Amino acid sequence: MVRLRIILSVFLAFAGSLVFGRETRIEFYPATPGAVFDERLSGSIEGRRVKFEYYEVCHPDSSAKKHIASSRIRLAADGPVNVELQVNSMTVKEAHLRTTGKDLGVTLAGPKLSFQLPGPGHYYLGLPEPAKSYATYTVFFWIDDLEKLNRTRVRPDGPDVTDVTVRGVTSDALKDQSRAIQAILDRGGTVYFPAGIYRTGTLQIGSNTVLYLAAGAMLKGTDNDTNFGDEFLKIENVQNVRIAGPGTIDANGKVVGGRNIHNVNITSSRNVVFEDVVFQNSKSWAVHIRKSDNFTARNVKVFSGKDGFDPDSSRDVLLENVFVVSIDDAVAVKNRYPEDTDGKTTERVTVRNAIVCSTKSALKIGTETRGPIRDITFENCDVFDGERGIVLYARDGGPIEKAVWRNIRMFMIDWPQEDNSGTAFHLTIEYRDGSKAPTPVRNSLIENVTANFIYRSELAGLPDAPLNGIEMRNIAIKVEPPKKSKPYLFECGDNVNLAIKGLTIDWQGNENKWAGIVSGPGLIVE
């Protein structure tokens, strides 16, 4: 019997690397320029030794002492891959390997871990803390779809493609090449950056332009402040722009004249697509989509010292298979521009199959609600190391209609600098800064949500805009010891009239450490 189990184990390990009778094909990418490798990790993927790049996302104000430490590796494959990982100098007693909507198995043997990643996708492995960080130390595995990559990959010798190195631009870690790169972009068409590092100030992307970054290519902000506007990449009053490829756009943590610089601003534009790229090192909102229509981000990764994505007074926005790590809000759907001051409604925004981590709000509508916000959907999303999870802040007049959060998993932690840290649901209608414009919330839904509770969830409304327009159903919570003594699971302020249809509570022996399920009569559990 033992011999049979060994033979079966060997067969399954071999079969795991096959796709319809053939081995998984893998493309390993070059390292990100300037990468720091994590010496605490060693490992192999399908038998090939690999290195993990260490990266910290830090708060713009260093005195805030908030940062998220992680390591990451990226490759392309067309099937499952087997991973062996060793965390050097320590024994791993617990590890959580997850992708959107599900946990995956991990085999632990002292400092060694082994597991299989089932194919293209985003995966995150939470480990005990081997680094100085306030969050869980997490290893990210990003597997691009090799078949899709080969279909969409831009070739430097392709028709109507301009390789920047043919036009005199060189990979140089120090040289400011703003003028040369901008001159190439001004020609339009497809602009190709091969592996290497290219330093530049703010670049303006014109209509009918494709900016393609090959694996191992990085556009990085120059140290020369005179070449910067409010953002690293500026997309304004244009249409038909695509930024793609598995390379990196690094804003270099710029602060110019006291202004934190965005990674990219999209303003009053149409038909803009981001695909596969990594945005990092922004000290302001990373991707701000304002007064624009038809924006899509697919398989995009964002690491930001402030917000991740901010759809703002924009319509027909799709964020699909995105991965966000942010010191402020991960995704914040808002409207800062009333229609009577050249703004638009914020409508038809979908965030789907996303994995996000945030020291503020993870999946948020608000805070700015100065114009109508309608048809907003968050679905099939994971939140890890969350400070606040599902968030609605209605404060400027709105209204907010048809907001949906569906099929959401949330893994909350206590960020020590935040009073509301660990709040799974924070749904409030309030007046902002003396304003008396109530913001009604109508025809909205929260369903199929799982979350751990370490702090209370908060619900509140106003006399002329009660919180009564949200249906909640199929909510499963796992209760941990509270970070503060004797809270209720749900704290209801005045003017709340909601019900949860189908609430499952796993107290885990902590029932006596909490005051109860609901404070006040405003929330009915059915």
Image: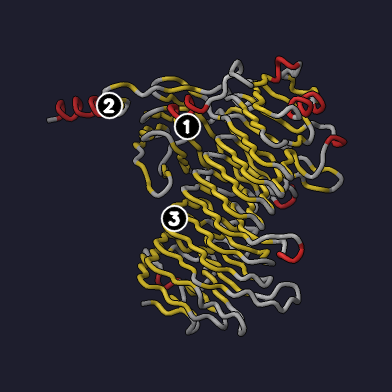
Mark drawn on residue 20: 2
Label 2 vs 1, first from the N-terminus: 2
> Can residue 486 be seen at all in this image of the molecule?
no
State the CA–CA distance, disc 3 to disc 1.
Answer: 23 Å
- Residue 429: where, in percent of width, then height? 61, 74
Mark 1 residue element: strand
User: Is label 3 in contact with label 1 (beta carbons under 8 Å)?
Assistant: no
- Residue 324: where, in percent of width, then height? 57, 45
- Residue at image position (57%, 40%) is 301
State the CA–CA distance, disc 2 to disc 1.
Answer: 19 Å
Vertical arrangement, residue 90 with respect to residue 517, above or below: above
Label 3 vs 1, first from the N-terminus: 1
Mark drawn on residue 144: 1
Residue type at mark 1?
Answer: Asp
Q: Is residue 215 left or right of residue 470?
A: right
Q: Is residue 155 left or right of residue 203?
A: left
Check disc 3: other Cα within 10 Å, few if <14, some if 14-19, many if 20+.
many
Residue type at mark 3?
Answer: Arg
Residue type at mark 2?
Answer: Phe
